[in-house]
Amino acid sequence: MKVAIVGFGFNAEKSHVPAYRNRSDIDLTAVVDPVTARRAAALRQYPNIRVYEKFGDLLEEYSDEIDIVDICLPNTFHLESVKQALGADKHVLCEKPLVLNKNEYHELVHIADERKRVLYPCHNYKFAPSIVHAAYLINEGKIGQPLFASFNIFGGGFQGTLPQNKRQSENNPELFGGGIMIDHGLDAISVAQTLFGGSPQQISAHIRNLNETDNQLEDLAVFSLDWEEKLINITVSSLGSMPKSYYRIQGTEGEISIENNDIFLSVKNQPVEQIFIPTNFDDPGHANWFNGLIDNLVDCINTKNTKPFPLMEAGLVLDIIEKANHSNHNGGAWMGI
Ligand SMILES: NC(=O)c1ccc[n+]([C@@H]2O[C@H](COP(=O)([O-])OP(=O)(O)OC[C@H]3O[C@@H](n4cnc5c(N)ncnc54)[C@H](O)[C@@H]3O)[C@@H](O)[C@H]2O)c1
């Protein structure tokens, strides 16, 4: 399948391109970016691709050579560019968050449905190898009935690829379109969904912009979810200087703890088992998570599945974030979802 990347910044170069490079079923044929240096960076790696300053020009001149449009733009440009791509009857892979509110979400789901095209949000934490393995252990009943989970996702430490050596979207509230909840809050909810299935019934949240000197974005959220008989405590922060994630899941028979590339499985009355699963939560590119995601995207396209799971999940995430904001404005009161 032939892919065009729209927005050749940090994420396109560090995550998507390495995944495409290792696959024989995906050809990168075009890149769109208004910044000359970014088009040059794409051409250095793929001398034979077409490059365009504007997405409209690519669709006008080269549409027949594209099956999938891969949107890696700053968040606030997702809505319009996804509409453009679906309008040209392309399948769409779109970086997260797909969009910023439920109205935009329903509009896109409707267009994808009408056009019979796959719209696939990049919820890549679902495909992080140690999360996939932990889900397997839980499903196998290794820790019995899960009761409690604690997730800590700390972002930071990006090495931008843009000329000014800084991701455009990272520190710009207008381009980012929201704070930590639409960034790592989304990831944490997606991990909970992957591990436990189902959905939460209520949320209590505290969301803050503690480091007011760097930007106007909320940089810390601490929230709890009542999730079908389980309590999940989540802390997501972009205050630090390097990315790190820790996950702990406790059940009736034991506990799973994930620390970067190791899973510790501790079952009552048995020695702790340490399982090495290269996941590299400390690499902001997360390049090795994308292969599973692309497998699933290709499968959805081949089977004409226009309701890929991450698209459904994107709607759930927006619901939860809306209720998190209500809770925060009400001093952390529990809000039904
Ligand atoms: N899945 C993940 O783990 C992950 C990680 C980082 C970023 N992201 C997401 O990826 C997206 C991009 O983030 P990034 O860090 O790569 O940002 P970035 O600022 O590094 O890159 C954005 C690129 O888009 C280009 N651009 C801007 N306007 C454009 C337009 N109208 N047409 C074409 N190109 C345009 C910019 O020149 C830049 O090259 C965001 O939605 C972000 O949330 C996801």
Image (spheres, rainbow, N blue to C red):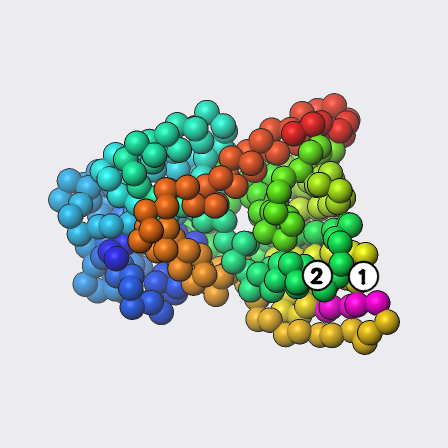
146 with respect to 182 (left or right): right
Q: Does the residue labelled 2 lie within 8 Å of ligand 1?
A: no
Label 1 is placed on what type of residue? Glu
**Which residue does the image show at 86% across and 71% down from the upper left?**
269
Q: Quadrant of the N terminus?
A: bottom left
The residue carrying pointer 2 sits among few (fewer than 14), some (14 to 19) or many (20 or more) residues within 10 Å by Cα, namely some
Q: Quadrant of the C terminus?
A: top right
**Which residue does the image show at 77% across and 27% down from the upper left?**
333
Residue 72 at x, y percent in the picture: 39, 47
Q: Report, in whole angstroms, how far the alpha carbon at label 2 lies from the one at label 1.
A: 9 Å
Q: In which quarter of the image is residue 215?
A: top right
Residue 306 at x, y percent in the picture: 37, 42
Q: What element carries label 2?
A: loop
22 with respect to 333 (left or right): left
| Residue at image mark 2 | 141
289 vs 75: above or below: below
Label 2 is placed on what type of residue? Gly
Of 102 and 76, nearer the camera is: 102
Q: Are marks 2 and 1 in contact (CB under 8 Å)?
A: yes
**Which residue does the image show at 74% across and 53% down from the upper left?**
146
Residue 33 highlighted magenta (yes or no): no
| Residue at image mark 1 | 253
Residue 251 at x, y percent in the picture: 78, 56
Question: What is the span of residues highlighted in magenta in the rendered image?
Answer: 264-268
